[in-house]
Image: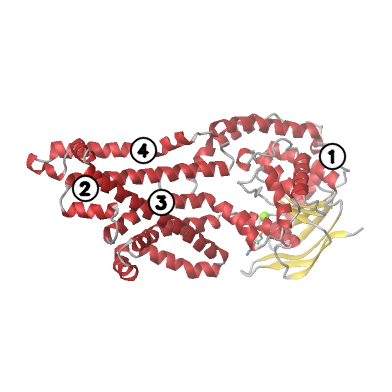
Amino acid sequence: MTRTLVMEGVSKRFDTGTVALTDVDLHLAAGDFVSVVGPSGCGKSTLLRLASGLDHVTGGTIEVNAHSTSYVFQEPALLEWRSAIRNVELTGELRGVPTSSRRARAQEALDLVGLTGFEQQFPRQLSGGMRMRVSIARALVTEPDLALFDEPFGALDEITRLRMQTELQRIFQLKQFAGLFITHSVSEAVYLSNRVIVMSGRPGRVVADIKIPWDYPRPPELRYEPEFGAITGEVSAALGEHS
Amino acid sequence: MKTTTTKAGLERDTLDAVGAEITEMAVAPMTPTETDVESAAAADVADETAEQALSGGATTTPWWRSAIRQSAPVLLALAGIAAIWYLVSLAVLPQDQRFLLPPPHEVFSRALTNSALMTPMLEALGRTVVVAMIGLVIAVVLGIGWAVVMSSSGWAERILYPYAVIMQTIPILALVPLIGIWFGYGFPARVIVCVIIALFPMISNTLFGLQSASPSAHDLFTLNKATALQRLTKLKFPAALPSIFTGLRNAAGLSVIGAMVGDYFFQQGPVGIGGLLRTYTLRLQMDALFTAIALTAVFGVLVFTIFAVLDRLVIGRWYGLKR
Ligand SMILES: Nc1ncnc2c1ncn2[C@@H]1O[C@H](COP(=O)(O)OP(=O)(O)O)[C@@H](O)[C@H]1O
Ligand SMILES: [Mg+2]
Protein backbone atom coordinates (compact mmCIF):
# COMPACT_ATOMS: atom_id res chain seq x y z
CA MET A 1 0.00 0.00 0.00
CA THR A 2 1.32 3.45 -0.87
CA ARG A 3 2.08 5.75 1.99
CA THR A 4 0.26 9.04 1.69
CA LEU A 5 2.51 10.83 4.16
CA VAL A 6 5.96 9.76 5.26
CA MET A 7 7.92 11.87 7.76
CA GLU A 8 11.35 10.65 8.73
CA GLY A 9 13.58 12.20 11.34
CA VAL A 10 11.80 15.52 10.88
CA SER A 11 12.94 18.44 12.95
CA LYS A 12 12.07 22.12 12.84
CA ARG A 13 14.02 24.99 14.26
CA PHE A 14 12.61 28.47 13.74
CA ASP A 15 14.77 31.49 12.94
CA THR A 16 14.00 32.72 16.42
CA GLY A 17 15.97 29.76 17.77
CA THR A 18 12.91 27.87 19.03
CA VAL A 19 13.20 24.15 18.33
CA ALA A 20 9.62 23.02 17.77
CA LEU A 21 10.17 19.41 16.66
CA THR A 22 13.00 16.91 16.89
CA ASP A 23 13.33 13.61 15.09
CA VAL A 24 9.68 12.93 14.34
CA ASP A 25 8.78 9.77 12.40
CA LEU A 26 5.23 9.48 11.11
CA HIS A 27 3.65 7.26 8.47
CA LEU A 28 0.15 7.62 7.14
CA ALA A 29 -1.68 5.60 4.47
CA ALA A 30 -5.08 5.90 2.81
CA GLY A 31 -7.71 4.80 5.31
CA ASP A 32 -5.58 5.82 8.28
CA PHE A 33 -7.03 8.34 10.66
CA VAL A 34 -4.29 9.32 13.06
CA SER A 35 -4.66 11.74 15.94
CA VAL A 36 -1.84 13.62 17.57
CA VAL A 37 -2.08 14.70 21.19
CA GLY A 38 0.53 16.59 23.15
CA PRO A 39 0.99 19.47 25.56
CA SER A 40 0.32 22.88 24.06
CA GLY A 41 3.31 24.47 22.37
CA CYS A 42 4.89 21.08 21.62
CA GLY A 43 4.82 21.63 17.85
CA LYS A 44 1.55 20.01 16.74
CA SER A 45 0.51 22.90 14.48
CA THR A 46 4.07 23.08 13.19
CA LEU A 47 3.82 19.40 12.26
CA LEU A 48 0.74 20.11 10.14
CA ARG A 49 2.28 23.17 8.54
CA LEU A 50 5.26 21.06 7.52
CA ALA A 51 3.05 18.28 6.14
CA SER A 52 1.00 20.79 4.13
CA GLY A 53 4.03 22.55 2.69
CA LEU A 54 3.18 25.87 4.38
CA ASP A 55 6.53 25.65 6.13
CA HIS A 56 9.78 23.75 5.53
CA VAL A 57 11.71 21.24 7.63
CA THR A 58 15.16 22.07 8.93
CA GLY A 59 16.09 18.40 9.26
CA GLY A 60 14.85 15.02 8.00
CA THR A 61 12.54 14.38 5.08
CA ILE A 62 8.85 14.61 4.23
CA GLU A 63 7.26 12.75 1.38
CA VAL A 64 3.66 13.42 0.39
CA ASN A 65 1.94 11.19 -2.17
CA ALA A 66 -1.32 13.01 -2.63
CA HIS A 67 -3.06 14.67 -5.57
CA SER A 68 -4.62 17.08 -3.19
CA THR A 69 -4.00 17.99 0.44
CA SER A 70 -6.46 19.99 2.46
CA TYR A 71 -6.25 21.77 5.74
CA VAL A 72 -8.91 22.48 8.35
CA PHE A 73 -7.85 25.27 10.65
CA GLN A 74 -8.52 25.73 14.33
CA GLU A 75 -11.02 28.47 13.56
CA PRO A 76 -13.36 28.08 10.58
CA ALA A 77 -11.47 30.81 8.65
CA LEU A 78 -14.47 31.57 6.45
CA LEU A 79 -14.68 34.66 4.28
CA GLU A 80 -17.39 36.68 6.03
CA TRP A 81 -18.61 38.32 2.82
CA ARG A 82 -19.31 35.05 1.04
CA SER A 83 -22.33 32.82 1.48
CA ALA A 84 -21.74 29.25 2.66
CA ILE A 85 -21.70 27.81 -0.84
CA ARG A 86 -19.43 30.52 -2.20
CA ASN A 87 -17.01 29.85 0.66
CA VAL A 88 -16.91 26.20 -0.36
CA GLU A 89 -16.43 27.21 -4.00
CA LEU A 90 -13.40 29.34 -3.14
CA THR A 91 -10.77 26.62 -3.51
CA GLY A 92 -12.14 25.69 -6.94
CA GLU A 93 -12.16 29.35 -7.93
CA LEU A 94 -8.51 29.73 -6.95
CA ARG A 95 -7.57 26.56 -8.81
CA GLY A 96 -9.44 27.59 -11.95
CA VAL A 97 -12.22 24.98 -11.87
CA PRO A 98 -15.05 26.03 -14.26
CA THR A 99 -18.06 27.65 -12.57
CA SER A 100 -20.69 25.02 -13.26
CA SER A 101 -18.77 21.99 -11.98
CA ARG A 102 -17.48 24.08 -9.08
CA ARG A 103 -21.00 24.93 -8.00
CA ALA A 104 -22.17 21.33 -8.28
CA ARG A 105 -19.26 20.01 -6.24
CA ALA A 106 -19.71 22.66 -3.58
CA GLN A 107 -23.35 21.66 -3.28
CA GLU A 108 -22.35 18.00 -2.86
CA ALA A 109 -19.86 18.92 -0.16
CA LEU A 110 -22.45 20.96 1.73
CA ASP A 111 -24.90 18.06 1.48
CA LEU A 112 -22.20 15.77 2.84
CA VAL A 113 -21.73 17.87 5.99
CA GLY A 114 -25.49 18.17 6.52
CA LEU A 115 -25.91 21.79 5.43
CA THR A 116 -28.43 21.27 2.63
CA GLY A 117 -30.66 24.34 2.62
CA PHE A 118 -28.05 26.64 4.19
CA GLU A 119 -26.17 27.40 0.96
CA GLN A 120 -27.09 31.07 0.86
CA GLN A 121 -26.46 31.84 4.53
CA PHE A 122 -23.52 34.05 5.45
CA PRO A 123 -21.03 33.00 8.16
CA ARG A 124 -22.40 35.53 10.64
CA GLN A 125 -25.82 33.95 10.35
CA LEU A 126 -24.51 30.48 11.22
CA SER A 127 -23.68 28.96 14.62
CA GLY A 128 -20.17 27.86 15.55
CA GLY A 129 -20.88 24.24 14.69
CA MET A 130 -22.31 25.13 11.31
CA ARG A 131 -19.39 27.38 10.48
CA MET A 132 -17.05 24.49 11.18
CA ARG A 133 -19.18 22.28 8.93
CA VAL A 134 -18.74 24.81 6.11
CA SER A 135 -15.01 24.80 6.77
CA ILE A 136 -14.91 20.99 6.55
CA ALA A 137 -16.97 21.08 3.34
CA ARG A 138 -14.48 23.54 1.88
CA ALA A 139 -11.64 21.16 2.75
CA LEU A 140 -13.39 18.10 1.31
CA VAL A 141 -14.63 19.68 -1.92
CA THR A 142 -11.21 19.14 -3.51
CA GLU A 143 -11.48 15.36 -2.86
CA PRO A 144 -8.22 15.33 -0.87
CA ASP A 145 -6.08 12.21 -0.40
CA LEU A 146 -4.62 13.79 2.71
CA ALA A 147 -6.68 15.85 5.13
CA LEU A 148 -5.03 17.78 7.94
CA PHE A 149 -7.07 18.98 10.93
CA ASP A 150 -5.66 21.42 13.50
CA GLU A 151 -7.88 21.16 16.59
CA PRO A 152 -10.98 21.94 14.52
CA PHE A 153 -13.45 21.27 17.34
CA GLY A 154 -11.42 22.95 20.08
CA ALA A 155 -13.62 26.03 20.23
CA LEU A 156 -16.97 24.21 20.15
CA ASP A 157 -19.13 23.43 23.16
CA GLU A 158 -19.14 19.84 24.36
CA ILE A 159 -22.46 18.79 22.80
CA THR A 160 -21.70 20.22 19.38
CA ARG A 161 -18.25 18.73 19.63
CA LEU A 162 -19.57 15.18 20.18
CA ARG A 163 -21.91 15.56 17.23
CA MET A 164 -19.12 16.81 15.01
CA GLN A 165 -17.00 13.80 15.94
CA THR A 166 -19.76 11.45 14.83
CA GLU A 167 -20.16 13.45 11.61
CA LEU A 168 -16.47 13.44 10.84
CA GLN A 169 -16.30 9.70 11.39
CA ARG A 170 -19.16 9.13 8.95
CA ILE A 171 -17.50 11.36 6.35
CA PHE A 172 -14.16 9.64 6.82
CA GLN A 173 -15.73 6.22 6.27
CA LEU A 174 -17.27 7.49 3.07
CA LYS A 175 -14.22 9.28 1.66
CA GLN A 176 -11.32 7.15 2.92
CA PHE A 177 -8.69 9.87 2.80
CA ALA A 178 -5.65 9.72 5.05
CA GLY A 179 -6.45 11.92 8.04
CA LEU A 180 -4.05 13.61 10.45
CA PHE A 181 -5.98 15.14 13.32
CA ILE A 182 -4.62 17.36 16.08
CA THR A 183 -6.61 17.59 19.29
CA HIS A 184 -6.11 18.31 22.95
CA SER A 185 -8.93 15.95 23.89
CA VAL A 186 -7.75 12.41 24.60
CA SER A 187 -11.25 10.96 24.31
CA GLU A 188 -11.76 12.68 20.94
CA ALA A 189 -8.47 11.22 19.70
CA VAL A 190 -9.32 7.69 20.84
CA TYR A 191 -12.89 7.82 19.54
CA LEU A 192 -11.94 9.02 16.05
CA SER A 193 -8.64 7.37 15.25
CA ASN A 194 -7.13 4.04 14.39
CA ARG A 195 -3.86 5.30 15.88
CA VAL A 196 -3.10 7.93 18.49
CA ILE A 197 0.32 9.53 18.57
CA VAL A 198 1.47 11.11 21.80
CA MET A 199 4.07 13.86 21.68
CA SER A 200 6.37 15.14 24.41
CA GLY A 201 6.64 18.74 25.51
CA ARG A 202 8.77 21.10 23.40
CA PRO A 203 10.83 20.20 21.51
CA GLY A 204 8.17 17.76 20.40
CA ARG A 205 8.96 14.18 19.57
CA VAL A 206 6.82 11.06 19.33
CA VAL A 207 6.74 9.25 22.69
CA ALA A 208 3.92 6.77 22.07
CA ASP A 209 2.06 5.36 19.07
CA ILE A 210 -1.03 3.60 20.32
CA LYS A 211 -3.24 1.42 18.11
CA ILE A 212 -6.97 1.75 18.63
CA PRO A 213 -8.61 -1.64 17.99
CA TRP A 214 -12.27 -0.91 17.10
CA ASP A 215 -13.69 -1.04 13.58
CA TYR A 216 -15.66 1.84 12.12
CA PRO A 217 -18.40 2.91 12.45
CA ARG A 218 -18.06 3.33 16.17
CA PRO A 219 -21.24 4.03 18.11
CA PRO A 220 -21.20 7.14 20.34
CA GLU A 221 -21.77 5.04 23.47
CA LEU A 222 -18.46 3.30 22.86
CA ARG A 223 -17.15 6.19 24.95
CA TYR A 224 -18.78 4.69 28.05
CA GLU A 225 -17.26 1.20 27.63
CA PRO A 226 -14.59 0.08 30.12
CA GLU A 227 -12.12 -0.76 27.28
CA PHE A 228 -12.50 2.79 25.97
CA GLY A 229 -11.63 4.06 29.43
CA ALA A 230 -8.64 1.75 29.58
CA ILE A 231 -7.23 3.09 26.30
CA THR A 232 -7.82 6.74 27.12
CA GLY A 233 -6.09 5.98 30.41
CA GLU A 234 -3.11 4.61 28.54
CA VAL A 235 -2.91 7.70 26.31
CA SER A 236 -3.28 10.06 29.25
CA ALA A 237 -0.55 8.21 31.14
CA ALA A 238 1.83 8.56 28.17
CA LEU A 239 0.95 12.26 28.01
CA GLY A 240 1.48 12.74 31.72
CA GLU A 241 4.89 11.07 31.74
CA HIS A 242 6.32 13.30 29.07
CA SER A 243 4.90 16.77 29.57
CA MET B 1 -21.45 61.88 17.12
CA LYS B 2 -19.22 58.99 16.15
CA THR B 3 -16.80 59.46 13.30
CA THR B 4 -14.01 57.10 14.30
CA THR B 5 -12.51 53.79 13.33
CA THR B 6 -13.46 50.21 12.48
CA LYS B 7 -16.49 48.00 12.62
CA ALA B 8 -17.87 48.72 16.06
CA GLY B 9 -21.23 49.69 14.60
CA LEU B 10 -21.55 46.44 12.73
CA GLU B 11 -20.68 44.40 15.79
CA ARG B 12 -23.35 46.13 17.76
CA ASP B 13 -25.84 44.93 15.17
CA THR B 14 -24.80 41.31 15.39
CA LEU B 15 -24.66 41.24 19.18
CA ASP B 16 -28.32 40.27 19.48
CA ALA B 17 -27.74 37.43 17.06
CA VAL B 18 -24.90 36.09 19.16
CA GLY B 19 -26.98 36.36 22.31
CA ALA B 20 -29.72 34.29 20.69
CA GLU B 21 -27.20 31.69 19.65
CA ILE B 22 -25.87 31.22 23.18
CA THR B 23 -29.31 30.83 24.69
CA GLU B 24 -30.21 28.26 22.10
CA MET B 25 -27.04 26.28 22.76
CA ALA B 26 -27.84 26.07 26.43
CA VAL B 27 -31.23 24.46 25.89
CA ALA B 28 -30.11 22.06 23.17
CA PRO B 29 -31.12 18.48 24.00
CA MET B 30 -28.46 16.02 25.18
CA THR B 31 -27.57 13.63 22.40
CA PRO B 32 -24.48 11.58 23.24
CA THR B 33 -26.65 8.51 23.72
CA GLU B 34 -28.16 8.85 20.29
CA THR B 35 -26.99 5.95 18.11
CA ASP B 36 -28.19 7.03 14.71
CA VAL B 37 -25.56 9.21 13.08
CA GLU B 38 -27.95 10.80 10.63
CA SER B 39 -30.50 11.75 13.22
CA ALA B 40 -27.83 13.40 15.37
CA ALA B 41 -26.87 15.52 12.41
CA ALA B 42 -30.49 16.32 11.72
CA ALA B 43 -31.05 17.36 15.34
CA ASP B 44 -27.97 19.54 15.21
CA VAL B 45 -29.10 21.33 12.09
CA ALA B 46 -32.66 21.61 13.39
CA ASP B 47 -31.45 23.37 16.55
CA GLU B 48 -29.35 25.64 14.51
CA THR B 49 -32.29 26.48 12.27
CA ALA B 50 -34.11 27.67 15.34
CA GLU B 51 -31.14 29.83 16.29
CA GLN B 52 -31.20 31.22 12.84
CA ALA B 53 -34.81 32.17 13.01
CA LEU B 54 -34.05 33.94 16.28
CA SER B 55 -31.07 35.78 14.95
CA GLY B 56 -32.52 36.64 11.56
CA GLY B 57 -35.34 38.92 12.69
CA ALA B 58 -33.68 42.02 14.02
CA THR B 59 -31.42 42.69 11.06
CA THR B 60 -33.64 44.33 8.45
CA THR B 61 -33.57 48.14 8.62
CA PRO B 62 -34.90 50.32 5.78
CA TRP B 63 -32.44 52.98 4.67
CA TRP B 64 -34.56 55.91 5.84
CA ARG B 65 -34.68 54.53 9.38
CA SER B 66 -30.93 54.29 9.24
CA ALA B 67 -30.75 57.87 7.95
CA ILE B 68 -32.89 59.14 10.81
CA ARG B 69 -30.91 57.18 13.37
CA GLN B 70 -27.62 58.51 11.99
CA SER B 71 -28.63 62.14 11.70
CA ALA B 72 -30.94 62.51 14.73
CA PRO B 73 -28.12 63.15 17.24
CA VAL B 74 -26.58 65.73 14.92
CA LEU B 75 -29.91 67.47 14.39
CA LEU B 76 -30.44 67.50 18.14
CA ALA B 77 -27.02 69.06 18.53
CA LEU B 78 -27.99 71.75 15.99
CA ALA B 79 -31.12 72.43 18.04
CA GLY B 80 -28.92 72.72 21.12
CA ILE B 81 -26.72 75.22 19.34
CA ALA B 82 -29.81 77.26 18.37
CA ALA B 83 -30.90 77.26 22.00
CA ILE B 84 -27.52 78.51 23.21
CA TRP B 85 -27.58 81.07 20.42
CA TYR B 86 -30.94 82.45 21.67
CA LEU B 87 -29.69 82.44 25.23
CA VAL B 88 -26.59 84.45 24.43
CA SER B 89 -28.34 86.79 22.06
CA LEU B 90 -31.34 87.63 24.24
CA ALA B 91 -30.14 87.04 27.80
CA VAL B 92 -26.40 87.56 27.84
CA LEU B 93 -25.62 90.32 25.36
CA PRO B 94 -26.61 93.88 26.30
CA GLN B 95 -28.88 95.65 23.81
CA ASP B 96 -26.09 97.70 22.21
CA GLN B 97 -23.97 94.62 21.47
CA ARG B 98 -26.76 92.42 20.13
CA PHE B 99 -25.61 93.06 16.54
CA LEU B 100 -22.70 90.65 17.27
CA LEU B 101 -25.14 87.79 17.59
CA PRO B 102 -28.70 88.67 16.59
CA PRO B 103 -31.27 85.98 17.44
CA PRO B 104 -31.54 83.24 14.75
CA HIS B 105 -35.07 84.00 13.55
CA GLU B 106 -34.14 87.61 12.83
CA VAL B 107 -31.01 86.60 10.98
CA PHE B 108 -32.60 83.97 8.84
CA SER B 109 -35.83 85.81 8.09
CA ARG B 110 -33.86 88.82 6.87
CA ALA B 111 -31.33 86.74 4.89
CA LEU B 112 -33.53 84.04 3.39
CA THR B 113 -35.97 86.57 1.91
CA ASN B 114 -33.15 88.57 0.36
CA SER B 115 -32.61 86.90 -3.00
CA ALA B 116 -29.81 89.31 -3.94
CA LEU B 117 -27.93 87.74 -1.03
CA MET B 118 -29.13 84.16 -1.29
CA THR B 119 -28.60 83.53 -5.02
CA PRO B 120 -24.85 84.18 -5.01
CA MET B 121 -24.53 82.37 -1.69
CA LEU B 122 -26.18 79.20 -3.02
CA GLU B 123 -24.13 79.39 -6.22
CA ALA B 124 -20.98 79.69 -4.15
CA LEU B 125 -22.06 76.72 -2.03
CA GLY B 126 -22.61 74.74 -5.23
CA ARG B 127 -19.03 75.45 -6.35
CA THR B 128 -17.70 74.39 -2.98
CA VAL B 129 -19.70 71.16 -3.22
CA VAL B 130 -18.08 70.50 -6.61
CA VAL B 131 -14.60 71.13 -5.20
CA ALA B 132 -15.31 68.87 -2.21
CA MET B 133 -16.65 66.02 -4.33
CA ILE B 134 -13.81 66.18 -6.87
CA GLY B 135 -11.32 66.35 -4.01
CA LEU B 136 -13.00 63.40 -2.31
CA VAL B 137 -12.93 61.26 -5.44
CA ILE B 138 -9.24 61.98 -5.96
CA ALA B 139 -8.48 61.31 -2.29
CA VAL B 140 -10.37 58.01 -2.40
CA VAL B 141 -8.64 56.74 -5.55
CA LEU B 142 -5.22 57.94 -4.43
CA GLY B 143 -5.68 56.72 -0.84
CA ILE B 144 -6.82 53.23 -1.81
CA GLY B 145 -4.07 52.92 -4.41
CA TRP B 146 -1.45 54.11 -1.95
CA ALA B 147 -2.65 51.62 0.69
CA VAL B 148 -2.75 48.74 -1.80
CA VAL B 149 0.85 49.41 -2.81
CA MET B 150 1.87 49.65 0.86
CA SER B 151 0.15 46.39 1.72
CA SER B 152 1.94 44.55 -1.07
CA SER B 153 5.19 44.31 0.87
CA GLY B 154 6.75 45.24 4.17
CA TRP B 155 9.30 47.33 2.30
CA ALA B 156 6.72 49.35 0.43
CA GLU B 157 4.94 50.08 3.69
CA ARG B 158 8.11 51.18 5.48
CA ILE B 159 9.05 53.47 2.63
CA LEU B 160 5.63 54.98 1.85
CA TYR B 161 3.96 55.26 5.24
CA PRO B 162 6.15 58.12 6.53
CA TYR B 163 5.02 60.29 3.60
CA ALA B 164 1.41 59.76 4.59
CA VAL B 165 2.24 60.65 8.18
CA ILE B 166 4.14 63.78 7.17
CA MET B 167 1.28 64.90 4.99
CA GLN B 168 -1.06 64.39 7.92
CA THR B 169 1.06 66.24 10.45
CA ILE B 170 2.14 69.35 8.47
CA PRO B 171 -0.51 71.97 9.20
CA ILE B 172 -2.31 72.81 5.99
CA LEU B 173 -1.67 76.51 6.66
CA ALA B 174 2.04 75.88 6.22
CA LEU B 175 1.45 74.46 2.77
CA VAL B 176 -1.08 77.01 1.53
CA PRO B 177 1.43 79.62 0.30
CA LEU B 178 3.39 76.97 -1.59
CA ILE B 179 0.29 75.51 -3.21
CA GLY B 180 -0.71 79.01 -4.30
CA ILE B 181 2.71 79.68 -5.85
CA TRP B 182 2.80 76.33 -7.66
CA PHE B 183 -0.78 75.87 -8.76
CA GLY B 184 -2.21 79.39 -8.85
CA TYR B 185 -5.00 80.78 -6.71
CA GLY B 186 -8.03 79.24 -8.38
CA PHE B 187 -9.95 76.00 -8.69
CA PRO B 188 -7.02 73.50 -8.93
CA ALA B 189 -5.42 74.84 -5.76
CA ARG B 190 -8.72 74.51 -3.88
CA VAL B 191 -9.05 70.89 -4.94
CA ILE B 192 -5.47 70.17 -3.91
CA VAL B 193 -6.04 71.51 -0.39
CA CYS B 194 -9.14 69.38 -0.21
CA VAL B 195 -7.25 66.24 -1.30
CA ILE B 196 -4.43 66.79 1.16
CA ILE B 197 -6.87 67.13 4.05
CA ALA B 198 -9.03 64.14 3.07
CA LEU B 199 -6.29 61.72 2.01
CA PHE B 200 -4.92 60.42 5.30
CA PRO B 201 -8.03 58.73 6.70
CA MET B 202 -8.45 56.97 3.36
CA ILE B 203 -4.88 55.68 3.42
CA SER B 204 -4.80 54.60 7.04
CA ASN B 205 -8.23 52.97 7.13
CA THR B 206 -7.70 51.13 3.85
CA LEU B 207 -4.29 49.88 4.95
CA PHE B 208 -5.71 48.70 8.28
CA GLY B 209 -8.47 46.86 6.40
CA LEU B 210 -6.14 45.26 3.86
CA GLN B 211 -4.12 43.84 6.73
CA SER B 212 -7.15 42.58 8.64
CA ALA B 213 -7.61 39.17 6.97
CA SER B 214 -6.70 36.35 9.37
CA PRO B 215 -3.44 34.41 9.03
CA SER B 216 -5.45 31.21 8.44
CA ALA B 217 -7.29 32.82 5.54
CA HIS B 218 -3.92 33.77 4.08
CA ASP B 219 -2.70 30.19 4.62
CA LEU B 220 -5.78 28.92 2.80
CA PHE B 221 -4.90 31.09 -0.19
CA THR B 222 -1.28 29.96 -0.06
CA LEU B 223 -2.27 26.28 0.05
CA ASN B 224 -4.43 26.77 -3.02
CA LYS B 225 -1.59 28.51 -4.85
CA ALA B 226 -3.43 31.81 -5.18
CA THR B 227 -1.75 34.50 -7.28
CA ALA B 228 -1.00 37.90 -5.75
CA LEU B 229 -3.89 39.35 -7.72
CA GLN B 230 -6.31 36.68 -6.47
CA ARG B 231 -5.16 37.33 -2.91
CA LEU B 232 -5.80 41.04 -3.37
CA THR B 233 -9.18 40.82 -5.08
CA LYS B 234 -10.65 37.81 -3.28
CA LEU B 235 -9.20 38.28 0.21
CA LYS B 236 -7.49 41.51 1.15
CA PHE B 237 -9.74 43.97 -0.65
CA PRO B 238 -13.07 42.42 0.39
CA ALA B 239 -11.78 42.16 3.96
CA ALA B 240 -10.89 45.86 3.79
CA LEU B 241 -14.26 47.06 2.59
CA PRO B 242 -15.75 47.91 6.01
CA SER B 243 -12.65 49.93 6.93
CA ILE B 244 -12.64 51.59 3.52
CA PHE B 245 -16.16 52.82 4.22
CA THR B 246 -15.11 54.12 7.62
CA GLY B 247 -12.31 55.97 5.85
CA LEU B 248 -14.75 57.25 3.25
CA ARG B 249 -17.06 58.66 5.92
CA ASN B 250 -14.21 60.51 7.61
CA ALA B 251 -12.70 61.66 4.31
CA ALA B 252 -16.08 62.98 3.13
CA GLY B 253 -16.41 65.16 6.23
CA LEU B 254 -12.86 66.41 5.84
CA SER B 255 -13.28 67.10 2.13
CA VAL B 256 -16.01 69.63 2.97
CA ILE B 257 -13.67 71.36 5.38
CA GLY B 258 -10.86 71.14 2.85
CA ALA B 259 -12.94 72.71 0.11
CA MET B 260 -13.88 75.62 2.35
CA VAL B 261 -10.32 76.18 3.48
CA GLY B 262 -9.35 76.14 -0.21
CA ASP B 263 -12.08 78.68 -1.03
CA TYR B 264 -10.99 80.88 1.81
CA PHE B 265 -7.40 81.18 0.69
CA PHE B 266 -7.62 80.86 -3.07
CA GLN B 267 -10.00 83.52 -4.25
CA GLN B 268 -9.25 83.67 -7.96
CA GLY B 269 -12.09 82.78 -10.30
CA PRO B 270 -15.70 82.13 -9.26
CA VAL B 271 -16.05 82.43 -5.52
CA GLY B 272 -16.92 79.54 -3.19
CA ILE B 273 -18.74 79.67 0.12
CA GLY B 274 -15.45 79.85 2.02
CA GLY B 275 -14.54 82.91 -0.01
CA LEU B 276 -17.89 84.52 0.77
CA LEU B 277 -17.37 83.85 4.49
CA ARG B 278 -14.21 85.92 4.27
CA THR B 279 -15.90 88.72 2.38
CA TYR B 280 -18.85 88.85 4.81
CA THR B 281 -16.45 88.93 7.75
CA LEU B 282 -14.46 91.79 6.30
CA ARG B 283 -17.63 93.77 5.62
CA LEU B 284 -19.21 92.83 8.97
CA GLN B 285 -22.34 91.54 7.17
CA MET B 286 -23.54 89.61 10.19
CA ASP B 287 -26.80 88.20 8.77
CA ALA B 288 -25.04 86.93 5.68
CA LEU B 289 -22.19 85.51 7.73
CA PHE B 290 -24.47 83.55 10.04
CA THR B 291 -26.55 82.29 7.14
CA ALA B 292 -23.47 81.13 5.28
CA ILE B 293 -22.18 79.35 8.39
CA ALA B 294 -25.55 77.67 8.88
CA LEU B 295 -25.58 76.57 5.23
CA THR B 296 -22.15 75.01 5.51
CA ALA B 297 -23.19 73.27 8.71
CA VAL B 298 -26.26 71.81 7.01
CA PHE B 299 -24.10 70.74 4.08
CA GLY B 300 -21.63 69.06 6.44
CA VAL B 301 -24.38 67.20 8.29
CA LEU B 302 -25.89 66.10 4.98
CA VAL B 303 -22.60 64.71 3.70
CA PHE B 304 -21.96 62.96 7.00
CA THR B 305 -25.42 61.40 7.00
CA ILE B 306 -25.22 60.27 3.38
CA PHE B 307 -21.94 58.47 3.94
CA ALA B 308 -22.95 57.02 7.30
CA VAL B 309 -26.11 55.56 5.75
CA LEU B 310 -24.21 54.31 2.71
CA ASP B 311 -21.69 52.69 5.07
CA ARG B 312 -24.34 50.80 7.01
CA LEU B 313 -26.27 49.76 3.91
CA VAL B 314 -23.31 48.47 1.97
CA ILE B 315 -21.55 46.80 4.87
CA GLY B 316 -24.73 45.24 6.19
CA ARG B 317 -25.45 43.76 2.78
CA TRP B 318 -21.83 42.75 2.40
CA TYR B 319 -22.11 40.44 5.37
CA GLY B 320 -25.56 39.23 4.38
CA LEU B 321 -27.14 40.91 7.40
CA LYS B 322 -29.81 42.76 5.44
CA ARG B 323 -31.93 41.33 2.70
N1 LIG C 1 6.61 31.06 12.93
C1 LIG C 1 7.18 30.80 14.13
N2 LIG C 1 8.32 31.42 14.50
C2 LIG C 1 8.89 31.15 15.70
N3 LIG C 1 8.42 30.28 16.59
C3 LIG C 1 7.29 29.62 16.29
C4 LIG C 1 6.61 29.84 15.04
N4 LIG C 1 5.50 29.05 15.01
C5 LIG C 1 5.51 28.38 16.18
N5 LIG C 1 6.57 28.71 16.95
C6 LIG C 1 6.93 28.14 18.25
O1 LIG C 1 7.06 26.76 18.11
C7 LIG C 1 6.49 26.08 19.20
C8 LIG C 1 5.43 25.10 18.71
O2 LIG C 1 4.32 25.83 18.22
P1 LIG C 1 3.01 25.10 17.70
O3 LIG C 1 3.38 24.14 16.63
O4 LIG C 1 2.03 26.16 17.34
O5 LIG C 1 2.53 24.32 19.01
P2 LIG C 1 1.14 23.57 19.29
O6 LIG C 1 0.31 23.64 18.07
O7 LIG C 1 1.54 22.19 19.66
O8 LIG C 1 0.51 24.26 20.46
C9 LIG C 1 5.94 27.13 20.13
O9 LIG C 1 6.88 27.35 21.16
C10 LIG C 1 5.82 28.34 19.25
O10 LIG C 1 6.01 29.49 20.02
MG1 LIG D 1 -1.59 24.57 17.70
Marks 2,1: beta carbons within 8 A: no
Q: Which residue is mark 3?
A: B252
Discs 2, 4: same chain: yes
- Which amino acid, mark 2? Leu
User: Is there a contact, CB below 8 Å, between mark 1 and mark 3?
Assistant: no
As drawn, the label of residue B73 is 4
Residue type (three-letter) at the residue carrying disc 1: Arg
Q: Chain of mark 2?
A: B
Looking at the rendered structure, the secondary structure element under dot 2 is: helix
Which one is closest to the eye, mark 4 or mark 1? 4
Q: Chain of mark 1?
A: A
Between discs 4 and 3, the one toward the N terminus: 4
On whether disc 2 and disc 1 are found on a single subunit, the reply is no
Front label number (2 vs 1): 2
**Which residue position is annotated with label 2?**
B289
Can residue B260 be seen from the camera position used here? yes
Q: What is the spatial separation of the Cα atoms under label 4 and label 1, in whole angstroms?
A: 61 Å
The quarter of the image holding the N terminus of chain B is top left
Say which residue label 1 marks. Answer: A218
Q: Are marks 4 and 3 on the same chain?
A: yes
